[in-house]
Amino acid sequence: MKSRFGWNTWSVTLVAIATFLFFTATSWNYHKHYPPGDWESDFWADATGYYMYLPGFFCHGFHAAGISDSLMHATGDAYILDREKDRIMDKYSIGPALLELPGYLIAEGITGRCTTNGFSVVHQRTMEASGVFYWVLSLVLLSLALQRLHPAAWWVPLIVFALITFGSNLFYYVLRMPGFAHVYSFFTLTVAFYTMVTGLLKDGRRNWLFSFACALTLLIRPTDAIALAVLHGWLLWDRPGILRKWDFWLRHLVAMLVVWAPQLLYWRFVHGSWFVYSYGHESFVNWRHPFIFEFLFAPWNGWLPHAPVVLLVPFGFIAMYRAGMKKQVWMIIAALAITVYLCASWWDWQFGCSYGSRPLVQYLVLLALPVWLLLANQGSRAWLSRRYWLPPLLLLALVNYGVMMKFPNCFFGEGTWDWGTYGRNIMNGVNMLLP
């Protein structure tokens, strides 16, 4: 049985299952050395803030009385226990928790409902499996979407996804930090992109899926409205009729109300207001003097030093331009420029303990397209040029994979431009790959 693109459906399914099983086992093997309560655990800080909605709701009804201060401290103080009002105060979005819910319910089925504090090793393992699952599903859907736009040989998706996964910081948030929001943003934006490319105007179910994916993307990270603007701008140029239909916007409204309802109800219960800016003093305070150069190039969490695949993107834009996607090129460039400015304006442009510029992880959904077109180009000149630039780039991706696996959770350098520490991190990754 073959798909409409000539792929064998069973082969793709088996490869996806094998990939999921292999990297889930890899994740479990890695994290068994860092149990819950360890600061290097994936149940720590931001990850706990996103996840806390699940045990907080199902076992405590968002009341603080049943939660100990020691548990709060053991998971990185990502939330606050308001003893006076008896509330769990969580500043993070509920979006990732909605996608973590199936894994949480599986863990509860294994351990027994609310018989643990919700941060057991079993819960940790299901969260890690969830991160790998959404990553694999994203790659399958992204392959289908890109094949629809520009059919390519069977090896193209394998190379593209090896580059964007291991040649960027994406895999770090798939395997090392699956509790952060980025793998879930990557997934929801992929679903929106897939449904936009393959289903709108023809399939009512996919129209609804597009609206719900957009609403969930916005809930997880509101600044990803910029990425969603690219998809809607694409529709404006490619299928303008759909944006004139009232039912398109009605679906968006219904999806927003359904998806955002848990967050609004939580804010109402905890804060007494339907809309709350829960981050307090944390904001875009550097908007007059953004740290753009540092955000892009610094060894301390800069984007390009931790994402060598980005070196291909300008050449991929040229390939898109020649393929008649001029408007899409400028929309993606504009969205990236605005997002970089916003992130560089954030009060902490390094975004804490991170690997690379993590707010750009989900933009790899859009950047996969120029990389795909660059690799899919046919002709003797294209084949000849790939012989020279593809092997070293794959080698860089392999080294970056080693660095991600050995990265000590934070950049422990002496300053923003400490290339010495960056170099030592690189060597640690290289040593991991050597026999």
Image: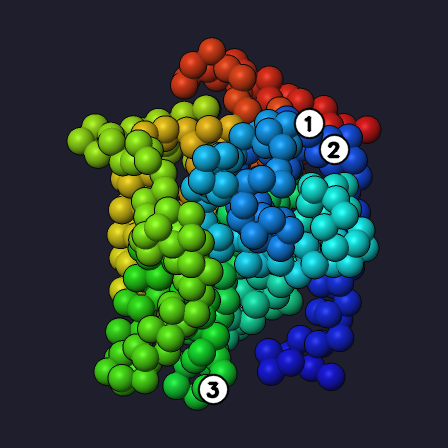
Residue at (49% x, 43% y) in the render? 87
Residue receiving disc 3: 203
CA gap, disc 2 to disc 1? 6 Å
Q: Is residue 392 above or below residue 378?
A: above
Name the spot of residue 106 as percent of width and height, x first: 74, 58
Name the spot of residue 171 as percent of width and height, x first: 60, 44
Residue at (41% x, 17% y) in the render? 417
Q: Earlier in the sequence, mark 3 or mark 2?
A: 2
Residue receiving disc 1: 38
Local crowd at mark 1 within 10 Å, few (<14), some, or many (≥20)? some
Q: Nearer the viewer, mark 3 or mark 2?
A: 2
Residue 91: mark in rendering: none
CA gap, disc 3 to disc 2? 45 Å
Residue 35: mark in rendering: 2
* Badge 2 vs badge 1, beta-carbon distance below 8 Å: yes
CA gap, disc 3 to disc 1? 47 Å
Q: Number of numbered discs present?
A: 3
Local crowd at mark 3 within 10 Å, few (<14), some, or many (≥20)? few
Q: Quadrant of residue 1?
A: bottom right
